[in-house]
Image (tube, rainbow, N blue to C red):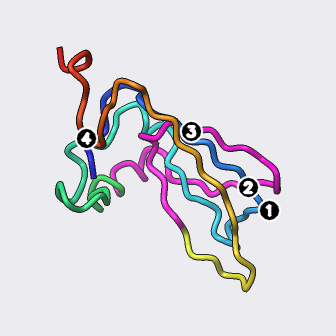
Amino acid sequence: MFPHLDFPFAYVVNVLLVDASPKNGATEVWLGTHHWGNNGLKESPENPWIRSEALEERRKVIPPIQASVPKGSLIIRDLRLWHAGIPNQTDEPRIMLSMVKIMVLIVNVGTLSTMVQQ
């Protein structure tokens, strides 16, 4: 897992291929977390999960949401936004396409080009 940058460096477009709701595992998002990132908040460099203490502190400010989103909708989000997969409580699969656009200045995962480093 690579460290997220402190500025917008990538965005994700999710395309809902079925209706999504909390019941069928709509993605949980933590609004506003893209403004202050997650560096230093993860369990460890090898573990991408945000520490539970940080989640609980954020929950006091703005708890996460699970939006009900109709089939065919697009969700566009900053890659730095905290988000989580939630279990699907139905027998029907929740299908979603995800496309990620990363700045061309990032050459390899976790490695910045000379332009960004200077």
Q: What type is the residue that disc 1 sits on?
A: Asp
Dot 1 and dot 2 residues touching (CB under 8 Å): yes
Residue 41 point in image, percent of width and height:
24, 49
Tag 4 or tag 3, which sits nearer the N-term?
3
Q: CA separation, marks 1 and 3?
A: 18 Å
Label drawn at residue 77 = 3
Task: Indicate the quadrant where residue 35 lies.
Answer: top left
Q: CA separation, marks 3 and 2?
A: 14 Å
Q: Residues within 10 Å of mark 1 (few under 14, many from 20)?
A: some
Q: Nearer the viewer, mark 3 or mark 4?
A: 4
Residue 15 point in image, percent of width and height:
70, 50
Position of residue 51 relative to residue 114, above or below, is below
Q: Nearer the viewer, mark 4 or mark 2?
A: 4
- Between 3 and 105, the residue placed more toward the observer is 105
Residue 45 point in image, percent of width and height:
17, 54
Tag 3 or tag 1, which sits nearer the N-term?
1
Q: Nearer the viewer, mark 1 or mark 2?
A: 2
Q: Report the residue at 59% width, 59% height from top.
A: 27
Q: What type is the residue that disc 2 sits on?
A: Leu
Q: What type is the residue that disc 3 sits on?
A: Arg
Mark 1 — residue? 19
- Between 51 and 78, the residue placed more toward the observer is 78
Q: CA separation, marks 4 and 2?
A: 29 Å
- Numbered-mark total: 4
Mark 2 — residue? 16
Q: Report the residue at 62% width, 42% height from top.
A: 13
Label drawn at residue 110 = 4
Tag 1 or tag 4, which sits nearer the N-term?
1
Segment tinted magenta in the rendering: 56-85
Q: Quadrant of the C terminus?
A: top left
Q: CA separation, marks 3 and 4?
A: 20 Å
Q: Nearer the viewer, mark 4 or mark 1?
A: 4
